Image (cartoon, rainbow, N blue to C red):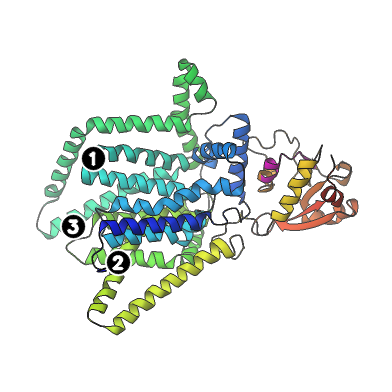
Amino acid sequence: MNLRRVDRRHVLAALAVLTAFGLLARFAVLGGRVFHWDEARVGYWTLRYLETGVWEYRPIVHGPVLFHVNAFLFETVGTSDAVARSVVALVGGLLPLAAYLFRSRLSNYEVIFFGLILAVEPVLLYYGRFMRNDVLAAGFALVALGFVLRFIDTRREWNLYAAVPGLVLALGTKEIALVYVGVWLGALLLLLDHRLFVAREEGRTWLAVTEPLVKRLVRGLKRYRWPIGLALGEFLFLVVLLFAPRPDLYQALAAPSKLPGVVHAATVESARALFGQWIAGGHEHSYVAFLGEALLTTATVSLPLVSFAVFGFLADRYTGDRPRDLVSFAFYTGITIYLLYPAITDISAPWSLVHAFVPLAIPAAVGLRVLLDWGLDAWDTEDWIGIALVAIVLLSVVGQVGFTAYDTSYRAPQDDDNPLVQYGQPAGDLRPTLTDIDAVVQANTGTDVVFYGDHFGVADESVADQYPANSNWLNRLPLAWYLERSGATTASATSPNELPEDPPVVIARVEHYGELADHLEGYESRTYELTSHGTETVVFLDPAALDNPRT
């Protein structure tokens, strides 16, 4: 095959292979890592939603998509860490196919490289195996953008209708979708600046540039007013379908008079809640510190992606007749989100990089294509030094990306020295103890687990988990997810005298070890970190309950 001539069939075949690899990489040992604090919080409330049938939009835990999809999966497939993460793994694994939507704006090799980056980039891989909304939001937004471009390039209306679900799903996973829209508009203004700059060099006025653009926009809006109106109706319908409180939505279907209230709750009230939490709520922190942590993580994990993105952007901007709109647009979008996210987030976490890296994958793909062109030119002219240099760069990048992806996602997915591990990730392997607790719970009657001390204790176990949850109950995460799955009955105690007789399991901070060890003589004790560090917790297990579960 002539490497310089790659047709669409080769592109599709390559993307299919990359998608298969991406899915395999994300689903392999998907349940191996113990749940992160944030995964456990959303997972727990999904179990409660499944049990009660009651759900309403709470922006602190982001959009409804994971709740609705995972409630269905838990009911039909079962509850496990792997099942809870499966929708994120599926979407993340399928992302390379989204690269094909950009085929009219990128070369064939650039489409393939775009898909390759989406499949193997370490940050996208790690958080594609994580029950969070970031990969979902970035992926759905990418699909929406791709279909909008297909509509612009082909004028086929079905692309417009296909873009709407992508945008709604992005919004329905995480509120960052609103930021995407604002950043996209800003990137479009920068593209307009491109044209104004060129016009000045050519001696044309700014009106000569803007007037035709405005006329084209007006003609387009007029010509496609009905499809656009239909798309807006589709948008509203899907927003209500996702954000409407349950079971209110189902009750409104049986009693249409309730429908206006449900629509109001899904739209106006959801917007107010979003504004109150993420815009008016305020998140005071050091921007410099958060940005510094993002830069350090990028340098450690994703330097090849960012380097090739900068290189691809500059190569596209300063070679050829003119910069391509998509490449510049994607670079502006990625860099803006990268610099903006530390200002708008409430905590510093590596998952924020997902939102910048997905758009930056486009100029990075361009950079890889330029490097490939250099290599092919060197091959044609038998420039062995050039061939060697290109080969060294490619092998270095492949080695670094492969090692980093393996190390962060498989070898040490919850170690404190893993740069992608956020503070809420338990450092140790709790699974053997969780398995033992589950076995005890299934056979025991009465109280199964006692949480000891002021750090974990709550006044009323029956309401401690209700939103907004008691802070001491939140300290139990991620254990609360596993105990709820097991159907455990929990209790609190603040002194040894409050402990029930021979409790099967007692959980406390490690500073209570001495007083509990004296009272729980003969119990087996195991110590873990419930976060990446600083939360040493001891689990006491009654050997009699383990060896001969009581009924």
Locate residue 147: give its quadrant: top left
Q: Given this view, does label 2 or label 3 mark the residue nearer the observer?
A: 2
Q: Position of residue 307 (x, y in %)?
A: 38, 67
* Residue 450 x/y as whole percent: 79, 44
User: From mark 2 to mark 3, how far is it between C-alphas?
Assistant: 27 Å
Write the residue at 64% across / 58% down. 532
Which quadrant is the C terminus positioned in?
top right
Q: Which mark is residue 369?
A: 2
- From the image, tell me which residue sits under label 3: 197
Mark 2: which amino acid? Arg
Q: Callout 3: few (<14), some (14-19), or many (20+) C-alpha neighbours within 10 Å?
A: few
Provide the residue designation for mark 1: 156
C-alpha distance separating marks 1 and 2: 30 Å
Q: Is residue 110 magenta?
A: no
SS at circle 2: helix
- Give the extent of the magenta segment: 482-492
